[in-house]
Amino acid sequence: MYKSTFDALEDEPLLFPNAMTLGVLGHSTAKRWTRECIANSIMNPLLGEVGKIPDVVLIPAEGNTGILLQDWAEGHRSACKVLETDWVRAGRRARALRDGRILKEATHLLIFLGIRSDYYEKIAMREAKKGRTVFTVDPKSGDLVLWSL
């Protein structure tokens, strides 16, 4: 069933200017990630740096880490938006379109860097230069790093 623009907007939660929106980019399929590992290695240090629980978490639908972060967000009473990627209609542009939406809506970023590509590293550098709070997760060690330029 087709929804008009106004109907689609009614389904979206209102975002307030002082709300913290954590956007998650990239994903990791590494076997090391568990609920406890995500909480202890990524989210707890991130909360320590930021000082508050995110009001909204924007998560891509792909990857194991997205599911684990969604569980974490729901357990901490954060609104969670899982963004689906329409690979059939958008083709190769699908990732860029989804990531662009996350970058537009997020006030803080958590980026899982890739082992073989520097795509997300370039995004992290660009957004940190703009003054946005950017955290990255190293693909080999799993360490959380706060970017400040």
Image (spheres, rainbow, N blue to C red):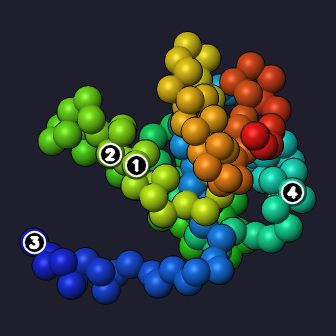
Work out whether mark 4 precedes mark 1 in sequence or the reverse, and give the earlier one: 4
> Mark 3 is on which residue type?
Tyr
**Mark 3–mark 2 distance (CA, rounded to whole Å):** 21 Å
Q: Earlier in the sequence, mark 3 or mark 2?
A: 3
Label 2 crowd bin: few (<14), some (14–19), many (20+), radius 10 Å:
some
Q: Is residue 29 visible?
A: no
**Mark nearer the N terminus (4 vs 2):** 4
Please provide percent x and percent y for residue 85. 32, 46
Question: Which amino acid, by three-letter code, is at mark 4?
Answer: Glu
The answer to whether residue 59 is left or right of residue 41 is left
Mark 2–mark 1 CB contact (< 8 Å):
yes
Q: Nearer the viewer, mark 1 or mark 3?
A: 1
Depth check, mark 3 against mark 4: the one in front is 4
Q: Quadrant of the N terminus?
A: bottom left
Q: Which residue is mark 3?
A: 2
Residue farthest toward the top in the current orientation of the protein: 116
113 in relation to 18, above or below: above
Query: Is disc 3 placed on a helix, strand or loop?
Result: loop
Q: CA distance from mark 4 to mark 2?
A: 29 Å
Residue designated by label 2: 97
Residue 100 image label = 1
Residues 10 and 39: in front is 10
Residue found at x 48% / y 63%: 105
Mark 2 vs mark 1, CA separation in Å: 5 Å
| Residue 18 circle label | none
Q: Is residue 104 visible?
A: yes
Point 51% across, 80% down: residue:
15
Circle 4 is placed at which residue position? 49
Q: Is there a contact, CB below 8 Å, between mark 1 and mark 3?
A: no
**SS at circle 4:** helix
Where's the C terminus, which quadrant?
top right
